[in-house]
Image (cartoon, rainbow, N blue to C red):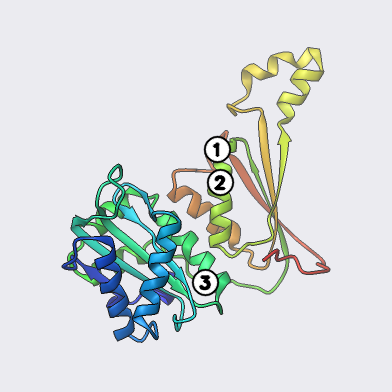
């Protein structure tokens, strides 16, 4: 997915800027030069207004500013690597050394959400961040990101499948939902549930000792149901979660199942 929106000319290594607004002006100018935006002034204004709603440095040294405005010709991703760091107005998180800028027009909201989800996932992988902040050439950044990009599968089939994700740890749920958005799955339903071991150990006295044998550290579970049209989605979901340190092949985390669906009536996509 990233390869469709990120080009070498939109990767900037150590730009000569000191602060956030100076950086935004620099990027707006470069984007107009590259034909990505029609008006650098309008795009700069959109960035500043979005930043006034909340500082987009979301974790130490990493910022994800984004703008959704009519001056953008097409959805894009731009990356800034700064070894010295750029002052971003959040002293507790330090100067920004890696910045992902996402911009789009009103014509591509679905792709915009997917791209933001992809960027958010990447920023949670320390290995990628460490390697990117050491890059000296745009080509190096592209090479690193290509290792973690999600490409369309040649096995894609226009059919319907039900994907069921059962999680034994509720702190995994947010990672699963973010990954589903990145994969373009916008119709998921989440059901709060209780494990079988908890139910029978609580309600049937003879099985009370089962609690001692449960691998899961939380008796509550979550089940996510979603209609998908690409049967490789489950494998992609597994790969994203494993990148983030959640291995579903490890006992006590959960599992994914897919079932072929005969018919879907109505529009299953909530967005």
| Circle number at residue 121 | none
- Left or right, 157 with respect to 249, comes to right
- Using the numbered discs, state the Cα–Cα distance from disc 3 to disc 1 in whole angstroms: 29 Å
* Label 1: how many Cα within 10 Å (few below 14, some 14–19, many 20+): few
Mark 3 vs 1: CB contact within 8 A: no
Mark 1 vs 2: CB contact within 8 A: yes
Dot 1: what SS?
helix
Which one is earlier in the sequence, the residue at label 3 or at label 1?
3
| Number of disc labels | 3
* Label 3: how many Cα within 10 Å (few below 14, some 14–19, many 20+): few
Q: Quadrant of residue 120?
A: bottom left
User: At 30% across and 45% down in the image, what residue appears?
Assistant: 93
Q: Front-most of 260 and 67? A: 67
- The residue pinned by badge 1 equals 171
Q: Quadrant of the C terminus?
A: bottom right
- The residue pinned by badge 3 equals 152
User: Which x, y percent locates residue 38?
Assistant: 39, 86
Dot 2: what SS?
helix
- Using the numbered discs, state the Cα–Cα distance from disc 1 to disc 2 in whole angstroms: 7 Å
């Amino acid at each position: 997915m990233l390869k469709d929106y990120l080009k070498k000319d939109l990767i900037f290594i150590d730009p000569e800027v000191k602060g956030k607004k100076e950086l935004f002006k620099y990027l707006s100018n470069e984007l107009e030069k590259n034909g990505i935006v029609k008006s650098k002034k309008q795009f700069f204004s959109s960035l500043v207004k979005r930043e006034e709603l909340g500082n987009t440095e979301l974790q130490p040294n990493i910022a994800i500013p984004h703008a959704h405005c009519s001056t953008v010709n097409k959805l894009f991703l731009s990356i800034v690597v700064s070894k010295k760091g750029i002052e971003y107005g959040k002293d507790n998180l330090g100067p920004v050394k890696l910045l992902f800028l996402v911009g789009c027009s009103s014509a591509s909201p679905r792709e915009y959400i997917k791209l933001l989800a992809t960027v958010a996932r990447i920023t949670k992988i320390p290995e990628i961040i460490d390697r990117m902040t050491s890059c000296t050439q745009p080509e190096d950044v592209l090479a690193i990101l290509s290792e973690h990009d999600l490409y369309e599968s040649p096995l894609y089939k226009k059919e319907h499948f039900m994907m069921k994700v059962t999680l034994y740890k509720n702190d995994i749920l947010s990672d699963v939902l973010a990954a589903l958005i990145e994969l373009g799955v916008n119709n998921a339903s989440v059901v709060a549930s209780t494990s079988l071991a908890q139910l029978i150990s609580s309600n049937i006295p003879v099985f009370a000792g089962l609690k001692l044998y449960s691998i899961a550290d939380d008796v509550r579970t979550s089940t996510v149901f979603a209609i998908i049209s690409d049967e490789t989605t489950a494998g992609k979901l597994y790969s994203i979660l494993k990148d983030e340190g959640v291995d579903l092949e490890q006992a006590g985390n959960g599992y994914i199942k897919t079932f072929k669906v005969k018919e879907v009536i109505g529009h299953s996509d909530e967005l």
